[in-house]
């Protein structure tokens, strides 16, 4: 049986209990191996704890275990009879904000934890803002440690109202707020007997039922070309196919398409999916297309539908998050990777920087440092084919790369 797959990322401030909550999810869904459980029970006993510290299931690095904090993004996989999950447990410390960007970049849901005793804090605001910037469609807020406030409905409602006030100007619309105790297990997998006043779903119930994926029929077709296939066999001496993974939409034999940045139109004459011919294909399948016209298509070109086609440009405005210690500066020469295409760029201008406390975009003429989020204007040496990130995430995300050592400096989102 093939399950639906939900990718989600955790976020929250330090000591809000993210790792404990993730451990509780894995433990209560019986996806913890016996040797893993034995190992964390042993470490917990060495620390003088009466029961297993479930946070150790996700704090996998030695430094994390020794310090009791999450440093890197810890990816975990688990499943239930209804759905499979890929979870990115991201750090809560301010200096690791970039890791939350990495973890949430492919997520469909952000799980933000709030300690009910502290309420909405600066990191809560940061993580909500980043989720909004990245276009994460669903946000689940777990108001944690309810056992430490005697499961008070009033305290929960106060935190809920505060978060909704923060989310409103960010444009986050699909929000579910759940009172939980990760340590005890209230409302994580099983309904809590301590909070009879709450009649919403448990966290797992929400994760199992939140709508995921987009209907490919509702999106324009995009195929970034990764490989031009010319086998030149005796049977097919003139065959030319264009291979890649469909980024969005649906394609059928007979559909008219446009190849960008060339702007040439043609008609689909054949579709190959995993070595078999097909009449139709859809995202995220990997396919090979054959066309009715001879077009000089190369790696990095984009085959798309003629309606709602992408933008071909040599200048892009983009929101970026700096992921490395090296700052991004005006006039800097870098490489940018848009899907399979790599192009040289110059940072033509730094427009603004997002104040992650006030959530305001402020004019900024200096460099962007590690963990900064800001707006750049990039001038490119060649045409790239992009969409607006708010419309299509897959064909509008890119990375900036150091052209000397190939290290990743920033992740970006085009704003057309």
Image (cartoon, grey):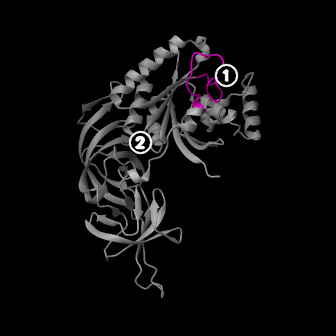
Considering the whole magenta stretch, tell me its main secondary structure: loop
> Where 252 sits versus 387, above or below?
below
Q: Earlier in the sequence, mark 1 or mark 2?
A: 1
Residue 170, x across and y down, in percent: 35, 30
How busy is the neighbourhood of tag 2: few (under 14 within 10 Å), some, or many (20 plus)?
many
Q: CA distance from mark 1 to mark 2?
A: 36 Å
**Looking at the rendering, which quadrant does residue 21 occupy?**
top right
Q: Position of residue 181 (x, y in %)?
A: 61, 22
- Along the line of sight, which residue is nearer the eye, 265 or 71? 265
Is 298 located above or below residue 406 in the figure? below
Q: Which residues are magenta?
A: 180-204
Q: Which residue is mark 2?
A: 323
Please, is residue 106 above or below residue 314 in the view? Answer: above
Q: In the drawing, what numbered circle is on residue 184?
A: 1
Q: Crowding near pointer 1: few (<14 within 10 Å), some, many (20+)? A: some
Counting from the top left corner in percent of width and height, residue 253 is at 40, 69
Rendered residue at 38%/45% (across/down):
410
Q: Is residue 334 above or below residue 120?
A: below
Secondary structure found at label 1: loop
Front in this rendered view, residue 2 or 44? 2
Q: Quadrant of residue 271?
A: bottom left
């Amino acid at each position: 049986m093939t399950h639906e797959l939900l990718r989600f990322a955790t976020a929250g401030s330090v000591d809000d209990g993210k790792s404990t909550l993730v451990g509780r999810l894995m433990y209560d869904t019986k996806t913890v191996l016996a040797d893993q459980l034995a190992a964390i029970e042993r470490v917990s006993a060495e620390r003088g704890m009466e029961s297993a510290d479930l946070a150790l299931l996700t704090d996998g690095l030695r430094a994390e275990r020794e310090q009791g904090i999450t440093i890197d993004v810890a990816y975990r996989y688990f499943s239930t009879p209804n759905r499979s999950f890929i979870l990115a447990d991201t750090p809560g410390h301010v200096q690791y904000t970039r890791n939350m960007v990495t973890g949430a970049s492919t997520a469909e849901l952000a799980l933000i934890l709030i300690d009910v005793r502290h309420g909405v804090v600066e990191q809560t605001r940061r993580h909500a803002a980043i989720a909004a910037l990245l276009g994460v469609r669903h946000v689940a807020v777990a108001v944690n440690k309810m056992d430490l406030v005697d499961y008070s409905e009033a305290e929960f409602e106060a935190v809920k109202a505060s978060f909704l006030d923060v989310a409103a100007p960010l444009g986050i619309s699909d929000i579910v707020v759940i009172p939980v105790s990760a340590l005890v297990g209230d409302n994580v997998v099983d309904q809590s007997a301590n909070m009879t006043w709450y009649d919403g779903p448990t966290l797992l119930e929400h994760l199992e039922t939140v709508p995921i994926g987009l209907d490919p029929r509702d999106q324009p077709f995009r195929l970034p070309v990764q490989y031009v296939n010319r086998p030149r066999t005796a049977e097919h001496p003139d065959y030319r196919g264009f291979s890649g993974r469909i980024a969005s939409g649906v394609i059928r034999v007979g559909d008219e398409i446009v190849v960008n940045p060339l702007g040439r139109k043609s008609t689909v004459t054949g579709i190959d999916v995993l070595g078999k011919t097909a009449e139709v294909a859809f995202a995220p399948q990997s396919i090979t297309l054959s066309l009715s016209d001879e077009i000089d298509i190369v790696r990095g070109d984009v085959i798309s539908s003629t309606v709602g086609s992408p933008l071909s440009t040599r200048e892009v405005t983009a929101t970026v998050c700096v992921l490395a210690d090296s700052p991004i500066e005006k006039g800097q020469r870098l490489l940018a990777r848009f899907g399979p295409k790599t192009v040289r760029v110059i940072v033509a201008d730094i427009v603004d920087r997002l104040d992650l406390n006030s959530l305001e975009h402020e004019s900024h003429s200096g460099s962007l440092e590690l963990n900064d989020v800001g707006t750049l204007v990039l001038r490119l040496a060649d045409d790239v084919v992009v969409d607006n990130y708010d419309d299509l995430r897959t064909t509008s995300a890119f990375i900036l790369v150091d052209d000397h050592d190939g290290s990743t400096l920033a992740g970006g989102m085009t704003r057309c």
